[in-house]
Amino acid sequence: MLVEPRAKKAETHHKPLTLSVVIPCFNEANSIRDVLEKVEAVQLADEIIIVDDGSTDGTRDVLKELEAEQHPGVRILYHPRNLGKGAAVMTGFQAAVSDIFLIQDADHEYDPRDYPLLLKPIYEGISPVVYGSRFLGGPRKAMNFWNMVANKGLTLCTNILYNAILSDMETCYKVFRAEVVHDMRIRSRRFEFEPEITAKVLKKGIRIYEVPISYNGREWWEGKKIKWTDAPIALWTLIRYRFTD
């Protein structure tokens, strides 16, 4: 996949849009360095913020090594204890200073080479929010059947409750113009962050733009963290924020 150089970024008020990539990280000692290198290789991020969410597997040792190497534009923040993915993402958002925020998981499931596809609708002013969908025909490793059922079921509930036509509400690849989330209060600390922020974006009247992405889902033995018990919590979150603020 070709990567557009920064010089080709669209401009708003004669100022190039800047990009912050936020990487929530919990117990990813085997992958965090590789993921950072892949994000850097795309050469689109103006800053990369890694938020370690209380890792206990040696991830912090790797992050300290990365800090000592002084990667340009990379900041590493630390939670004193595990608070959850949603809390880590919001810590990153609060620290970010760019025009666009992009969420990147710290494993190998999502490929930063898809960034140009994700950013193009924002650069062109099509939508201030873009989701990368695993179900729009991009190359992907076969998912577990019941994971797919849960994903599609939650997405269907999102569409019914919020009058949308999303294909992948639970995707990691969510991209926002900064002003969309700056005033947004997110209460969810764990995986229910995904439905809460989606609900609040849709309640703002914003139509989310989706693009196809590649997906290399990992197995449970490889460290996949989301569990079946997260599905009913996500469903309740969708219902709750449909009728409350």
Image (cartoon, helix red, strand yellow):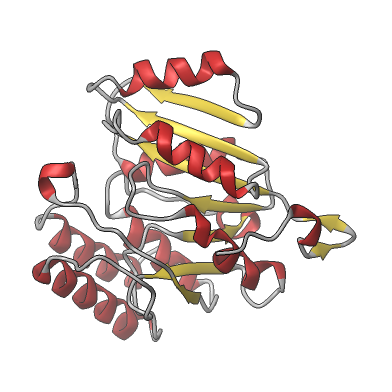
Res 181 quadrant in image = bottom right
Res 46 quadrant in image = top right
Which residue is pictured at 53% across the width and 79% down the height?
207
Q: Is residue 211 left or right of residue 19?
A: left
Q: Is residue 82 left or right of residue 104?
A: left
Image location of residue 218, percent across then percent down:
21, 52
Q: Is residue 170 left or right of residue 36?
A: left
- Please determine whether, in this image, residue 164 is positioned above or below residue 52: below
Which residue is pictured at 65% across the width and 32% down the height?
73
Image location of residue 85, percent across then percent down:
33, 43
Which residue is pictured at 65% across the width and 57% down the height?
179
Nearer the observer, 40 or 209: 40
Position of the N terminus, as image quadrant, is bottom right
Q: How many marks?
A: 0
Nearer the observer, 180 or 101: 101
- Please determine whether, in this image, residue 104 is positioned above or below residue 40: below
Q: Is residue 210 left or right of residue 242?
A: right
Image location of residue 188, percent across then percent down:
32, 49
Which residue is pictured at 71% across the width and 50% down the height?
18
Image location of residue 28, percent across then percent down:
29, 33
Nearer the observer, 129 or 63: 63
Position of the C terminus, as image quadrant, is bottom left
Q: Residue furthest front?
A: 1
